[in-house]
Amino acid sequence: MRVYHSHRSRGSSQHQRRVVQPKPTTGVIDTTAYDDLRPGALIRSKMLRDHAYPATFSTTAGVLVENPAGDTFMTGASHGIGKNETVWQADRPDRTIAKAVVEISFTDLTLLELEDDVNFVNETFETDAGTIPEFTRLRTSGDELSPYAVCYINSPYTGNIEASMVAKSARLHQSASHLTDRSLRYIVYDWDVFRPS
């Protein structure tokens, strides 16, 4: 998979600032349904319950990726995708924007296929300073970030936040039934310290 530029874009998209600036201390979040979906936009999914009121999960749109066959998918947090596997933007529950097609084991990552009429721009929201943090490629086992390298999050709950990478750790994950090399997996964690921008 590689990060891809856009999905069915109508042409060059204007840089976008959030319509609603999140204020975590007062509970203000950005629930805007943007014409061009982008990383950090709020998305929702229905959590099915048998004998109770319907409830929803919420998470943010991830990045757009492309597989070797040329198929594009939006990434999303698996824990924010409900059992019916469809998602919509927060202010538009009547319009499905994507459907989950595969959950990647041990990652809490789901690949979602976008609807044909959804425009997706692989560019984050502008910061207050008018800059747009660039994506860097995912690290492989041989790559290292320098200590205190800067990373960013622009969440509908928090707004733009910068972080510094301060440590790395790994956890051994193994199958409960067999202790073979094939069943052993290492999950690597990057520990970051966030600070308001």
Image (cartoon, helix red, strand yellow):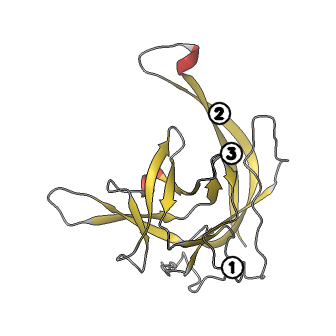
Closer to the observer: label 1 or label 2?
1
Could you say whether the residue bearing mark 2 is in a helix, strand or loop? strand
Question: For this rendering, which residue is in front, 74 or 9?
Answer: 9
Question: For this rendering, which residue is in front, 87 or 60?
Answer: 87
At 26% from the left edge and 58% from the top edge, which residue is drawn? 48
Question: Of label 3 and label 2, which has the lower sequence position?
Answer: 2
- The crowd level at tag 3 (other Cα within 10 Å; few <14, some 14-19, many 20+) is few
At 51% from the left edge and 46% from the top edge, which residue is drawn? 108
The tag on residue 170 is 2
- Residue farthest toward the front in the current orientation of the protein: 69
Q: Report if the CB atoms under discs 3 and 1 are less than 8 Å apart.
A: no
Q: CA distance from mark 3 to mark 1?
A: 36 Å
- The crowd level at tag 2 (other Cα within 10 Å; few <14, some 14-19, many 20+) is few
Question: Of label 1 and label 2, which has the lower sequence position?
Answer: 1
The tag on residue 11 is 1
Q: Amino acid at mark 2?
A: Ala
| Left or right: where 80 falls relative to 144 | left
Closer to the observer: label 3 or label 1?
1
Q: Badge 3 is on which residue?
A: 190
Where's residue 104, x and y in %?
51, 42
Q: Amino acid at mark 3?
A: Asp
Q: Report if the CB atoms under discs 1 and 2 are less than 8 Å apart.
A: no
Could you say whether the residue bearing mark 3 is in a helix, strand or loop? strand
Where's residue 178, x and y in %?
46, 14
| Left or right: where 94 falls relative to 167 | left
Task: Check the image and report above or below for 90 versus 3.
Answer: below
The answer to which quarter of the image holds residue 51 is bottom left
The answer to which quarter of the image holds residue 143 is top right
Q: CA distance from mark 1 to mark 2?
A: 42 Å
Task: Check the image and report above or below for 60 versus 16.
Answer: above
Could you say whether the residue bearing mark 1 is in a helix, strand or loop? loop
Q: CA distance from mark 3 to mark 2?
A: 9 Å
